Image (cartoon, rainbow, N blue to C red):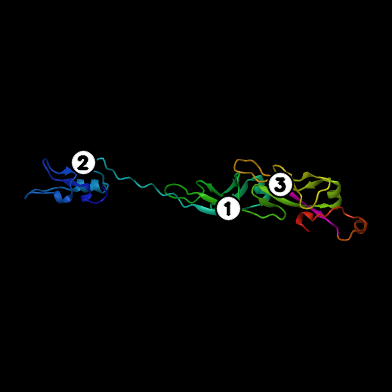
Amino acid sequence: MPFGGGFGGYSSGAGGPQPGGGFENFNFESGDTADLSDLFEGLFGGATGGRAGGPFSGFRQRGRAAQKGADVAYRLKVAFEDAVALKPQRITLADGKTIDLKLPPGLEDGTRIRLAGKGEDGPGGRGDALVTIELAAHRFYTRDGTNIRLELPVTLKEAVLGAKVKVPTPDGPAILTIPKGTTSGKVLRLKGRGFAAKDGKRGDQLVAVEIDVPADDSQLQKFVEDWTAPGNPRAGLGV
């Protein structure tokens, strides 16, 4: 029974107090004296421990563990390419020490990394450092899950005749094949050039082709004037 009904205390009877009754059942005859210290020590945890050999001698006060030092929070801005490559980041802690922080697979904006024992000192040891990652934006890459998107300008000649062109990736330049007759908006794929998932497998780089048409090219203007394009490219839109 929880704290009620006389706390599940003693009851009087033959041979002295017995377990199971409430305090209202204690009966003392004139001249008797009683020491209830053992009873109260047992009921309330025995701040000084039960008396040796007493009915509550098995109770002992449980000591409180010494408190660790406080955790320290940090924010770390990571360059886009570094986040893709999981490049270790050198950071300076509050105590002036520098460490190389390893970036984990599955890294995202807002990921929090715990560094055990890198916080403030305390009686029970040092607290931890909690590093929140902020991924920096990039001027031409955008993130799409574990994939990376890039808009790639190509010339009209490269799009019409096909070509092999150099493309930037976070791992360095790569060669991409532009198929013959590529139109603007076509998405090409460079495998394994994206972010690492939690299992370590990397996403891809998705390259959207954008045909760059020069504004003042007299030869191109003359060609187009004499050229009749077959079909209607907007037929699929119902117009």
- For residue 205, the mark is 3
> Residue 201 is drawn in which quadrant?
top right
Crowd tier of the residue under label 3, counting other residues whose Cα lies within 10 Å: few below 14, some 14–19, many 20 or above: many
Alpha-carbon distance for marks 2 and 3? 74 Å
| Image position of 173 (left or right of 44) | right
Amino acid carrying label 3: it is: Gln
Query: Given this view, does label 1 or label 2 mark the residue nearer the observer?
Result: 1
- Please state, as top left, top right, bottom left or bottom right, where the C terminus lies in the image: bottom right
Q: Residue furthest bottom?
A: 216
Say which residue appears at 59% left-offset and 43% top-offset. 198
Mark 1 or mark 2: whose residue is earlier in sequence? 2
Q: Residue furthest left?
A: 30
Q: Nearer the viewer, residue 149 or 126?
A: 149
Crowd tier of the residue under label 1, counting other residues whose Cα lies within 10 Å: few below 14, some 14–19, many 20 or above: few
Q: Nearer the viewer, residue 222 or 3?
A: 222
Say which residue appears at 47% left-offset and 52% top-offset. 70
Magenta region: 207-214
Q: For mark 2, what is the residue?
A: 55
Q: Residue 158's spot in the image, x, y percent?
A: 84, 49
Q: Residue 211's spot in the image, x, y percent?
A: 81, 54
Alpha-carbon distance for marks 1 and 3? 22 Å
Q: For mark 1, what is the residue?
A: 110
Mark 1 or mark 3: whose residue is earlier in sequence? 1
Q: Residue 234's spot in the image, x, y percent?
A: 79, 56
Amino acid carrying label 2: it is: Pro
Alpha-carbon distance for marks 1 and 2? 57 Å
